[in-house]
Image (tube, helix red, strand yellow):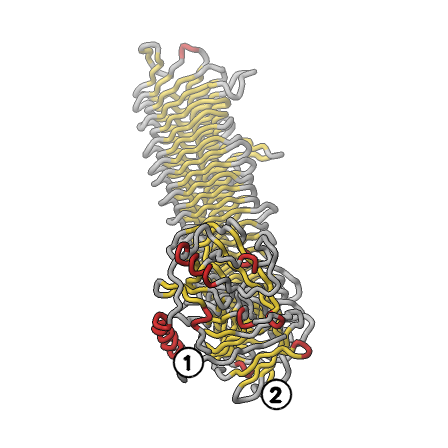
C-alpha cells in the first residue's frame, strides 16, 4: 500500500516502494500537486508508475526510481494525459528528474499529451523495440505521430543536463509544437528501426552544449516548421543515416562541434536554410557532408566532408562562403550546386574533389576564389555547365587528370577572370570554354596571373575555346600550354600584353574562315608558333594589331613564327619593329597618326626587282599618312623615294636593287626620307598634322589643338593658346620655294629624344638652344637637319600671350611672335598674301625681337659654329657619315 506524508502542501514519497496493479500513483486532484519522489523511493506500476488524465499543471520531482512494469499501452514511467478539450499547447506538467532520479518506461519514459517541461539530471529510458523490429512512430500524409520513446511531449521543452542520460531504442526525445531541447548530457536512440535522437514534428530549437551528445539513426529529425539547431564546440551530433535531417521546413544550423553520419549524410535539408560551421566545427558524412534540396546560405570556417560522395550539395540557389580556415572535401566533388537558380560561391579556404571536381556549378552562378583560396579537383578544379557562369580567381585552382578536364571548365560558356597572383593549373587544359567539338560555345578569359597546362600527353592547352571568344593576357601574366598556349575554333580576339607559350603553338586558330584578331602590346611575348589559320590572300583573314605602349615593340619572326596572318595593323601612335618576310597579299595598315614601323628585314618585306627572301610580289601598305614613319633598318644609302603609277612606292639605293611597296592608292601625300641611327626614315612631309605638342594632358597633335587649350612651355608653365595660324602651300608653284620648303630634323639630332620623332619646321621657325633662338634653316647640315622638297604643305603656328618656347616632339621651339607676318596665314584676319615667305621686314623684326622676344635671335657664325659642331658630333654618334658635314641636296619623293 502506498506510503507517503504531506509536508508544506507537497506530497512526498520516501524510502519505500509503491506498487500498483495498473498505475502505482494516479494523480487526480490538486491535493496531490506537487509530487516529490525522494531518494530511495521506488514507484512501480504494472502499466505506468505515475499517471494523470486531468488537465492540471502537474509538478513532479523525482530523486528515486519510477518504473513501468508493463509491455502494453500506457506502459510509461510518467504519463500525463490532457483532459477532454485541452489545447495541445496547454501546459500540463513540469518534471524535474534529479541527478539521483531514474525514470524507466516500456513505451515511454515520460509522456505528456500536451505541453510541458522536462528537466533531467538523472536517467530517463524506454525499452520499446529492444527485442523486436518495431517503429516508435507512424507517418502518414506528411504527419509524424510518436508512439513510443524516452521523452514524448506535445510541446514545451526538454533540458538534459551534463552527465544525464535520455535513452531509447526508438525515439529518445520528441517535442511537438515548435519545442525546445537543451542538451549537455547524452540523448541516444540505439535501435535499428526508426531510432531518432531528437524529433521535432513541428520544428523548434535544439541546443547541444559542450560535452553533449545526441545520437540515433537520425540524431535530429525535424519536419514542418522552422528549425534551429546549435551544436556548440565540444558537442556531438551523430547519426548512422543523418546527423541532422530537416525534411519539410527551413533550418538555421550553427555548428562548432561535430555533426556526423556513419552511413549517409551529416546534414540533410529538404527546404534549405542557413548553415554556419564555425572554426573548429566538423560536418562529416559517409556519403555527403551537406545535402540540401532548397536554397541554402552556407558559411564555413571548419570542415565539411563527404567521404564517398560530395562535401556539400545544394540543388537550389546557394550562397556559399568558405573562410580561410574552411575545408570542404568530397570523394567526387568538394561542392556541387544545381537546380534552376544561380548560386554564388566564395572561397578563401580549401575546396577539394578527390575523384571529381573541386566545385561543380549546374545552374549558373559565380565562383570567387580569393587570394587565400585553393580549389582542387581531379577532372576539373571548377566545372560550370551554364552559359551565365562566372569565375574570378586570385588564389589557386588546379586539376590533376590527364587528357581530360581543366583547371576551370565552362562547358556552356561564361567568363573567367584570373586576377593578379591567381594560378590556374591543370594536366590537360588550364581554362576550357565549351565541351564538344561540334557546338559553338563562346566565352571570355581575362588573365592577370598564371594559367598553365602541365600537359604530358602533348595536346593540352593553356586556354581552349570552342566558340567565339575573347582572351586578354595582361602585362606580366602568363598563359602556358603543353602543346598549345591558346586554341581557338571560332572567331576569337586575343589581347596579349604578357607571355603566351606552347610547345608547338603559342596561338592556333584551328578552323579557317574566321576573322581572328591578335592585339599585341609592346613587351608582349609569344613562345611558339602563332598561326592565324587563314591562308594569305583569303577573303577572310586574321589581323595582327600592334598597339601603343611605354616602349617600342618588336615582332621578329613574321612569316616564320607568325604565319597565316593576312594583315598587320598599327594603332595610332604605335612604334614597332617588324622582322621576317611579308608576302604578296598581306597588308600593313597604319591607323591614325604618329605611327612608326621599323622593317628589320626591309628587302624581305618590300618587293624587289630581283627576288629577295622567299617570295615575290608586293605587300600592301595602307593608311600611311601624316605623322607616320616607316623605318628601313640597316638601309643607309637611299637615293630616292617616289610614288609612281598604281600607287607603287619605289625606294632606290645607291647600291643594291630598288624596293617596292604597294600603297592603298588613297594617300596622295608627298613623301620624304632621312637617314638616322643607321636606318632610313620615310615620312609624309608635313609640318603640321601629327606633330605633337606637349600639353598638361600629354602630347597632342598640333592640328587637334584649339584656341584656349593649354600648352606646356619649356619652363614647365602652362599657358593658353591665344591664336593658331594655319596656311596650306603649294611649294612647287611658289616663286621662292626655298623660303617655304620645310626643314626636316631627324630623331635625336640635338640629343636623346630631341626630337623624339622626325620634326618639320618652316625655314625661319626658331629652335631654342644655349639660351638662344636659332632659325632652323641656319642649322641645315645635309644629314640630321636638312631641307626637303615637298609638293603641298600645311604650316601651323601657335601664339601665346607672350613670346615663349614650347616642346614640339620634345624639341624646344618658339611660339609665334608678331613681326608683321600674320597675313601670311590664311586665317590672319587681313588680306592673305598670295605667295607668303614667312620672312618679314628685317628692320621691323630686329625692333620686335629686341623688345618682345623670349630670347635673343642668333645670327653670327661665331654663335652658330659651336652648336653646329655639337650637331656634327651627335650625327656621328648616330651613324651618319663624317665627310665634313657639307650640306647635301634636298631629298624628295613626290606623289
Residue receiving disc 1: 885
Give the quarter of the figure containing the N terminus: top left
Label 2 packing within 10 angstroms: few (<14), some (14-19), many (20+): few
Residue 179 x/y as whole percent: 47, 28
**Place of residue 678 in the rendered image (x, y in percent of width and height, measured from the top left):** 44, 80
Whether 168 is drawn above or below 844: the answer is above
Report the label total: 2
Pointers 1 and 2 in contact (CB under 8 A)?
Answer: no
Secondary structure of the residue carrying tag 2 is loop
Q: Nearer the viewer, residue 380 or 786?
A: 786
The C terminus, quarter of image: bottom right
- Read off the residue under disc 2: 609
Q: Residue at 64% across / 70% down in the picture?
A: 668
Give 134 or 602, whichever is nearer the viewer. Answer: 602
| Near-viewer residue (420 or 300) | 420
- 64 left or right, relative to 478: left
Q: Nearer the viewer, residue 161 or 681?
A: 681
Q: Give the x, y percent position of residue 415.
A: 55, 55
* Residue furthest out toward the front: 843
**Residue 138: assigned label:** none
Seen at 49% across and 82% down, the residue is 635
Quick check: can you spot residue 53? yes
Relative height, residue 560 to residue 706 (above, below): below
Residue 489 location in percent, x, y? 62, 67
Query: Which numbered disc, 1 or 2, marks the residue closer to the eye?
Result: 1
Q: Is residue 425 visible?
A: no
Badge 1 marks a residue whose secondary structure is loop
Task: Give neighbour class at mark 1: few <14, some 14-19, many 20+ (Cα, 10 Å).
Answer: some
The residue under the point 64% across, 69% down is 667
Distance Cα–Cα, label 1 vs label 2: 33 Å
For marks 1 and 2, the one nearer the N-term is 2
Amino acid at each position: 500500500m502506498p506510503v507517503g506524508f504531506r509536508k508544506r502542501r507537497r506530497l512526498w514519497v520516501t524510502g519505500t516502494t509503491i506498487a500498483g496493479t495498473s498505475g502505482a500513483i494516479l494523480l487526480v486532484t490538486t491535493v496531490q500537486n506537487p509530487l516529490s519522489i525522494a531518494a530511495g523511493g521506488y514507484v512501480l506500476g504494472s502499466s505506468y508508475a505515475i499517471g494523470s488524465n486531468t488537465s492540471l499543471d502537474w509538478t513532479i520531482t523525482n530523486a528515486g526510481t519510477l518504473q513501468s512494469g508493463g509491455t502494453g499501452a500506457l506502459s510509461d514511467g510518467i504519463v500525463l494525459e490532457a483532459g477532454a478539450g485541452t489545447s495541445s499547447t496547454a501546459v500540463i506538467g513540469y518534471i524535474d528528474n534529479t541527478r539521483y532520479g531514474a525514470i524507466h518506461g516500456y513505451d515511454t519514459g515520460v509522456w505528456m499529451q500536451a505541453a510541458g517541461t522536462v528537466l533531467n539530471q538523472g536517467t530517463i529510458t524506454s525499452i520499446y523495440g529492444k527485442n523486436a523490429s518495431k517503429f516508435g512512430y507512424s507517418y502518414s500524409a506528411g504527419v509524424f505521430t510518436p508512439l513510443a520513446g524516452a521523452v514524448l511531449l506535445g510541446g514545451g521543452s526538454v533540458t538534459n543536463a551534463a552527465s544525464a542520460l535520455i535513452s531509447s531504442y526508438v525515439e529518445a526525445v520528441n517535442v511537438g509544437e515548435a519545442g525546445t531541447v537543451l542538451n549537455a548530457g547524452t540523448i541516444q536512440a540505439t535501435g535499428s528501426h526508426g531510432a531518432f535522437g531528437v524529433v521535432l514534428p513541428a520544428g523548434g530549437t535544439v541546443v547541444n552544449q559542450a560535452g553533449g551528445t545526441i545520437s540515433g539513426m537520425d540524431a535530429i529529425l525535424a519536419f514542418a516548421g522552422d528549425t534551429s539547431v546549435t551544436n556548440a564546440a565540444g558537442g556531438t551530433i551523430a547519426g548512422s543515416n543523418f546527423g541532422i535531417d530537416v525534411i519539410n521546413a527551413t533550418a538555421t544550423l550553427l555548428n562548432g562541434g561535430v555533426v556526423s553520419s556513419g552511413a549517409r549524410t551529416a546534414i540533410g535539408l529538404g527546404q534549405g536554410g542557413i548553415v554556419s560551421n564555425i572554426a573548429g566545427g566538423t560536418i562529416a558524412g559517409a556519403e555527403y557532408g551537406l545535402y540540401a534540396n532548397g536554397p541554402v546560405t552556407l558559411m564555413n570556417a571548419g570542415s565539411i566532408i563527404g567521404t564517398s560522395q560530395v562535401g556539400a550539395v545544394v540543388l537550389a540557389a546557394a550562397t556559399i562562403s568558405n573562410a580561410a580556415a574552411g575545408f570542404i572535401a568530397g570523394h567526387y566533388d568538394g561542392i556541387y550546386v544545381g537546380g534552376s537558380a544561380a548560386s554564388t560561391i566564395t572561397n578563401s579556404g580549401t575546396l577539394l574533389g578527390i575523384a571529381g571536381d573541386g566545385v561543380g556549378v549546374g545552374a549558373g552562378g559565380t565562383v570567387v576564389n580569393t587570394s587565400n583560396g585553393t580549389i582542387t579537383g581531379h577532372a576539373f578544379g571548377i566545372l560550370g555547365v551554364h552559359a551565365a557562369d562566372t569565375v574570378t580567381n586570385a588564389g589557386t585552382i588546379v586539376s590533376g587528370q590527364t587528357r581530360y578536364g581543366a583547371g576551370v571548365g565552362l562547358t556552356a560558356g561564361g567568363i573567367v577572370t584570373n586576377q593578379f597572383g591567381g594560378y590556374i593549373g591543370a594536366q590537360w587544359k588550364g581554362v576550357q570554354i565549351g565541351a564538344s567539338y561540334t557546338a559553338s560555345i563562346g566565352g571570355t578569359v581575362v588573365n592577370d596571373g598564371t594559367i598553365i597546362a602541365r600537359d604530358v600527353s602533348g595536346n593540352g592547352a593553356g586556354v581552349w575555346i570552342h566558340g567565339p571568344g575573347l582572351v586578354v593576357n595582361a602585362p606580366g601574366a602568363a598563359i602556358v600550354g603543353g602543346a598549345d598556349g591558346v586554341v581557338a575554333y571560332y572567331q576569337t580576339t586575343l589581347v596579349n600584353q604578357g607571355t603566351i607559350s606552347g610547345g608547338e603553338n603559342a596561338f592556333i586558330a584551328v578552323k579557317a574562315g574566321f576573322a581572328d584578331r591578335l592585339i599585341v602590346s609592346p613587351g608582349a611575348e609569344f613562345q611558339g608558333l602563332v598561326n592565324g589559320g587563314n591562308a594569305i590572300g583569303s577573303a577572310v583573314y586574321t589581323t595582327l594589331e600592334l598597339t601603343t605602349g611605354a616602349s617600342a615593340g618588336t615582332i621578329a619572326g613574321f612569316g616564320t613564327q607568325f604565319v597565316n596572318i593576312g594583315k598587320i595593323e598599327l594603332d595610332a601612335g604605335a612604334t614597332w619593329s617588324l622582322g621576317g618576310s611579308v608576302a604578296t597579299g598581306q597588308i600593313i595598315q597604319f591607323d591614325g597618326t604618329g605611327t612608326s614601323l621599323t622593317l628589320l628585314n626591309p628587302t624581305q618585306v618590300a618587293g624587289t626587282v630581283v627576288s629577295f627572301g622567299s617570295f615575290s610580289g608586293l605587300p600592301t601598305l595602307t593608311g600611311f599618312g601624316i605623322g607616320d614613319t616607316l623605318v628601313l633598318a640597316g638601309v643607309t644609302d637611299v637615293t630616292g623615294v617616289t610614288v609612281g603609277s598604281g600607287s607603287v612606292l619605289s625606294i632606290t639605293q645607291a647600291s643594291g636593287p630598288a624596293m617596292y611597296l604597294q600603297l592603298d592608292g588613297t594617300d596622295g601625300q608627298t613623301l620624304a626620307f632621312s637617314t638616322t641611327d643607321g636606318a632610313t626614315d620615310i615620312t609624309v612631309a608635313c609640318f603640321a598634322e601629327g606633330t605633337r605638342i606637349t600639353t598638361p594632358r600629354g602630347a597632342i597633335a598640333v592640328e587637334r589643338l584649339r584656341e584656349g587649350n593649354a600648352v606646356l612651355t619649356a619652363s614647365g608653365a602652362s599657358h593658353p593658346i591665344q591664336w593658331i595660324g594655319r596656311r596650306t602651300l603649294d611649294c612647287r608653284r611658289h616663286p621662292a620655294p626655298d623660303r617655304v620648303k620645310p626643314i626636316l630634323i631627324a630623331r635625336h639630332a640635338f640629343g636623346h629624344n630631341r626630337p623624339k620623332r622626325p620634326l618639320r619646321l618652316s625655314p625661319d621657325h626658331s629652335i631654342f638652344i644655349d639660351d638662344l633662338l636659332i632659325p632652323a634653316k641656319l642649322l641645315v647640315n645635309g644629314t640630321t637637319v636638312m631641307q626637303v622638297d615637298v609638293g603641298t604643305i600645311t604650316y601651323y603656328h601657335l601664339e601665346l600671350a607672350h613670346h615663349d618656347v614650347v616642346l614640339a616632339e620634345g624639341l624646344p621651339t618658339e611660339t609665334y611672335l608678331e613681326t608683321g607676318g600674320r597675313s601670311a596665314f590664311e586665317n590672319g584676319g587681313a588680306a592673305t598674301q598670295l605667295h607668303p615667305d614667312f620672312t618679314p621686314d628685317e628692320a621691323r623684326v630686329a625692333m620686335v625681337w629686341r623688345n618682345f622676344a623670349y630670347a635673343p635671335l642668333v645670327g653670327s657664325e661665331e654663335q652658330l659654329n659651336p652648336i653646329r659642331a655639337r650637331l656634327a658630333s651627335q650625327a656621328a654618334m648616330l651613324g651618319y657619315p663624317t665627310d665634313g658635314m657639307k650640306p647635301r641636296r634636298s631629298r624628295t619623293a613626290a606623289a
